[in-house]
Image: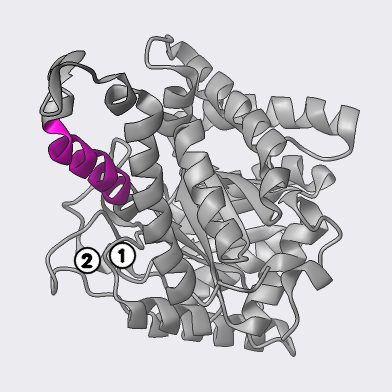
Amino acid sequence: MVQASEVLKGKTGVIYGDDVYNLFKHAQSEGYAIPAINVTSSSTVVASLEAARDAKSPIILQMSQGGAAYFAGKGVDNKDQSASIQGAIAGAHYIRAIAPAYGIPVVLHTDHCAKKLLPWLDGMLDEDEKFFKANGVPLFSSHMIDLSEESKEENIETTKKYLQRAAPMKQFLEMEIGITGGEEDGVNNEDLDNNSLYTQPEDIFDIYKTLSEVSQYFSIAAGFGNVHGVYKPGNVKLRPELLQKHQQFVKEQVKSKDDKPVFLVFHGGSGSSVDDFRQAISYGVVKVNLDTDMQWAYLSGVRDYVLNKKDYLLTQVGNPDGEDKPNKKFYDPRVWVRSGEITMSQRLKVALDDFYTAGKA
């Protein structure tokens, strides 16, 4: 088995350009996908990195517009997306600084950017270009533009313009076609007609053809019934076999020898079955988004700690061990926050096994 490190110039820390491309091709050839974890703080960053390090796996860390604003601080005004821009930049610098300590390759990404949020993407690209001029790489490995709620024509044309801006930096751009249902980060698609959740092969080819003329550094989140959040079994009807049809159609149209010419992305992954994940991965999915399950895992650790230590958390002094016993070592944030990190890491390790990512770094 060829390890990812054998095809990457940057073995550890945040990777860019050809390394991201080669990592995704390696994932397709070796039959695995990389979890993309939404991070909102240094705590969720290290929980993710720790799990990836222990499993010897590559990882994708991504910030949403709301998550980036949270990174800046909830008390910062987000007028004109300023908090989201500053928070994303701060988070990126933190991840770039700490990632090498974990000894695995990291893709630094930003999540869904709808049409109304484009000023956020513009601000981050401004910073990418400044950083590229000074360092030869952009600040972020990649961004996502999500115009899936717009017409196909507008979606492709606007995505192309942004890819033209990212291309000189060899920066990846992820786009979405076919809407992901459910609700996430303030975007609510819970009432959609199910037909809009499934992308057609012709749409994938139109995107591939248009974007390939600009750059090879792009991926497509194609809808195959995906839904954000966790729902009762039977309420979500995933059809990962559609992804195979997309790959076959593009291969035939461009006369490629590659069975998986498209880098595909799986959105709305939380709550899906392992079989659905693995089937999608076999059709060329290289990235799987996980947010809801990670939030629940993080909460579980904090919740269980507080419930188990309740009698030590009601007062600063005095507990079952004695009226004069101090409780500082129990309410120190480094203790109960760490409990959330541990359970989040444990849940991510499960995903790294489910997606065959473990051991691939």
What type is the residue that disc 2 sits on? Asn
Q: Quadrant of residue 273?
A: bottom left
Residue visible at 56% across and 50% down in the picture: 49
The answer to whether residue 84 is magenta is no
Q: Is residue 111 visible?
A: no
Q: Label 2: which residue?
A: 194
Q: Label 1: which residue?
A: 197
State which region is magenta. Answer: 295-310
Residue 345: x and y in percent read 43, 54
Residue visible at 67% across and 44% down in the picture: 99
Q: Nearer the viewer, residue 235 or 301?
A: 301
- Mark 1 burial class by Cα count in 10 Å: few <14, some 14-19, many 20+: many
| Position above or below: 32 against 223 | below
Cβ–Cβ under 8 Å for marks 2 and 1: yes
Disc 1 secondary structure class:
helix
Q: Nearer the viewer, residue 38 or 168?
A: 38
Residue 258: x and y in percent read 71, 86
